[in-house]
Amino acid sequence: MKSRGWSIDSLVLIFSIIIVAQLLSYVVPQGQFDREPSADNPNRMQVVAGTYDPADAESKVTMAPWQFLLSLTKGFESAQEIIFLIFIVGGIIEILRETGAIDAGLHRAVARLGGRPWILIAGCLLLFSIASYTIGMGEEYVPLIPILVSMSLAMRMDAIVAMGMVWVPYGIGWACAGTNPFGVIIAQNIAGVPLMSGSGARLAMMFVFLALAFHHIYRYAMRVRKDPSQSLVADVDYTTGFESPDDDDLNGRRIGVLVVFVLGIVLFVWGSKNYGWYIAELNAVFFGIGLVGAAIGGLSAGDTSRAFIRGAAGMTAAALIVGFARTIEVVLSEGHIMDTIIHYIAQSLEGTGAEVSALGMLLVQTVCNLFIPSGSGQAYVTMPIMSPLATLTDVPQQTAVLAFQFGDGFTNMIVPTSALVMGALALGKIPYTAWVRFVGPLLIKIFALAGVFLVLSIHLGDAVGFTS
């Protein structure tokens, strides 16, 4: 996925938080925890409970008024691995799209699923959620909205059903992602847990959420088929503007490209589990996927180069947001107030239990996504605080990552600050209020189930592969 509707508003908000972080350094008491290597991962330093030590007069620091500007470079330097990953993955995905494999695969799959309503709905839920689960797709779905609206209308359903078949699995796929390099990989990197660990458990959760979504969408679709006046968009004119694409030929070359992509992902999961592969190896695997995919897809060296540069360039906004978001942690740490904030939050949660702490994390992440509709940006804003907080409240790191994913992913279905959501609704001629009326009740059920899964992950995480 290249981006999720990045806008200057996100950058303004994050830059404002950087300034606020520096201002807080002048009023929030300074102090630090002792840190030690994690027993599960010696490469990850974790806070030691009960060791918070307020700073004395001699050790207090006063940041220069312009310190936040100097910290920007340090923020980008600290996030360089993820920034490089974003550029590389963006470029490689564009190469795969240049071969026509991704778009042809999506279009052909949708067309083949168009027999009976339940097959179309179930197939789309599965298809789009898996694409989001693996590589964080979302932007690529937008052009499919008119196609699915046309198919839904032909089957006596409506545009709401079409939007539900795309955007609901998009949100579920992001929320339960196991290999998405723009979400779970970044959060696991910050939390210091093995990349892509727990993918099987996340996949199982995704299928449960999809079953809930299928029931909600299918029940509405059948109600509209029975009585068109029950449609939430019954007053919208859909007589024009919904045509099929010209080129959706899924030929042998394009199938080969898709096979190479799947094998590449499987290779990295295997290497990560058996040889401790990390971001450098992930970048290498994606480069290999791009080169082999370009060769199979018949792209020339020049076309491959231009596609890669175009895709990487399209990730500039995402990379910048990551760098700016990382600067927040740098400023808080340089002002010696990061640990103070963690200490105060932990104190407020003392005695509530790990379960309540995990649910509180979900609430925080959900609210944050309303203002920062950027998965990678939100990870760098919240996870540096949530990860040590998890240690202090006996919440497993994987549960903290899962709370981030749930809070970030599910609201992707509805968050009005996302250009992708609003753009998709515009293509489908769906009023935002109508969409909220449809998806709102589903989200209530989804978040209730998400809370159950969070609590279960605390007690059963090790049994389902949630390696710490």
Image (spheres, grey):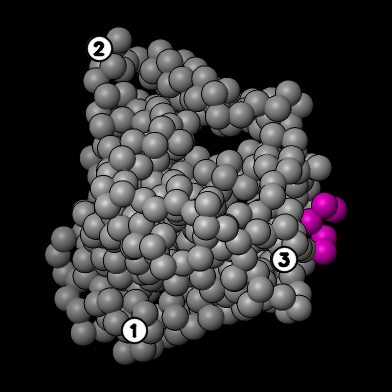
In the drawing, what numbered circle is on residue 302? 2
Query: How far across and down, in percent of the image, does residue 424 sit?
Result: 28, 61
In the picture of the structure, the residue carrying the numbered disc 1 is 231
In the picture of the structure, the residue carrying the numbered disc 3 is 393
Query: How far across and down, in percent of the image, does residue 292 sit?
Result: 46, 15
- Dot placed on the residue nearer the N-terminal end, 2 or 1: 1
Q: Amino acid at mark 2?
A: Gly
| Callouts 3 and 1 close, C-beta under 8 Å | no
Residue 41, relative to residue 35: is it above or below?
A: above
**Stretch in magenta:** 459-463
Camera-nearest residue between 332 and 411: 332
Query: As drawn, which residue projects farthest toward the right?
Result: 463
- Dot placed on the residue nearer the N-terminal end, 3 or 1: 1
Between the C-alphas of marks 3 and 1, the distance is 47 Å
Quadrant in the picture for residue 372: bottom left
Residue at the image point whose x is 45% and y is 51% from the top = 61
- Mark 1, residues whose alpha carbon is within 10 Å: few (<14), some, or many (≥20)? many
Between the C-alphas of marks 2 and 1, the distance is 50 Å
Q: Amino acid at mark 3?
A: Thr
Residue at the image point whose x is 85% and y is 53% from the top = 463
